[in-house]
Amino acid sequence: MGRKKQGPYQKKSGGTYYCRLVVPTPLREAAGRTQLTRSLKTDDYNTALKRFGGVLQELERDLQRQLADPSFRQKVALNSGSALTPDGSDLTASEKAAAVLGVRFVDEKNIRHRQVLDAITGQKPLPVTWDEALALWIKERNKANARNLAEGSIKQAQKSVEEVRPFGSPSDLNKH
């Protein structure tokens, strides 16, 4: 069986060259993708070869960043279990929430603090934020399409989110 050729490739004959990084099988669940692809912005093979190495390194850094940086939601999920202080005593829910939020004390009047505290105690799930909803939309669109979303499409979606943000969180909205 032959080995996959590493190098620039075209999606259609005569078109733009792309760089592809295949995500290793054990990391696909955490990355949420099977491959990362980026345009080399040329249809000339020799120019694509020159750009390939730098773009491949960028894709590898992007993959490492995705795997290394736990999201806020993951931090809350990790802290909803039992956590011990250095002296062996169990942390209270408000101490865990303060650690996740990066503050000294949880302010009960702050809605975000209250939501994190409720999620850690298991009373309510953490509601989706607009930034998470936008990131999820981008991720799902990139999975479904052969090409990643264009920067202009992402900027337009961000603009639309900013217009709707004052009316509440995504979980507050309904169809009516």
Image (cartoon, rainbow, N blue to C red):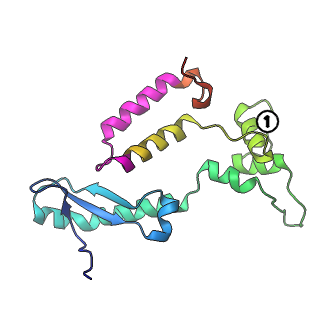
Residue that appears at 27% across and 83% down: 1
Side (left or right) of 26 relative to 56 = right
Point out residue 27 in the picture as x, y percentages from the top left corner: 49, 67
Establish if 53 lies above or below 93: below
Question: Where is residue 38 shown, x and y percent of the image?
Answer: 29, 56
Residue at the front extreme of this rendering: 1
The residue to which callout 1 is attached is 107
Image coordinates of residue 94 in percent, x first then y, are: 82, 46
Name above or below for residue 76 compared with residue 124: below
Look at 56% across and 22% down and name the residue there: 166
The residue nearer to you, when weighing 40 against 174, is 174
Amino acid at circle 1 = Asp
Question: Range of the magenta residues?
Answer: 142-164
Q: What residue appears at the point 78 percent right and 29 percent down from the top-left corner?
A: 109
Q: Tell me which residue sits at (36%, 31%) in the image.
A: 156
- State which quadrant residue 81 falls in: bottom right
Dominant SS type (magenta):
helix
Q: Position of residue 65 (x, y in %)?
A: 48, 60
Mark 1 nearby-residue class (10 Å; few <14, some 14–19, many ≥20): some
Q: Residue furthest top?
A: 176
For residue 53, side relative to residue 124 (left or right): left
Q: Nearer the viewer, residue 43 or 125?
A: 125
Label count reads: 1
Quick check: is 158 in the magenta stretch?
yes
Looking at the image, residue 74 sits to the left or right of residue 11; the answer is right
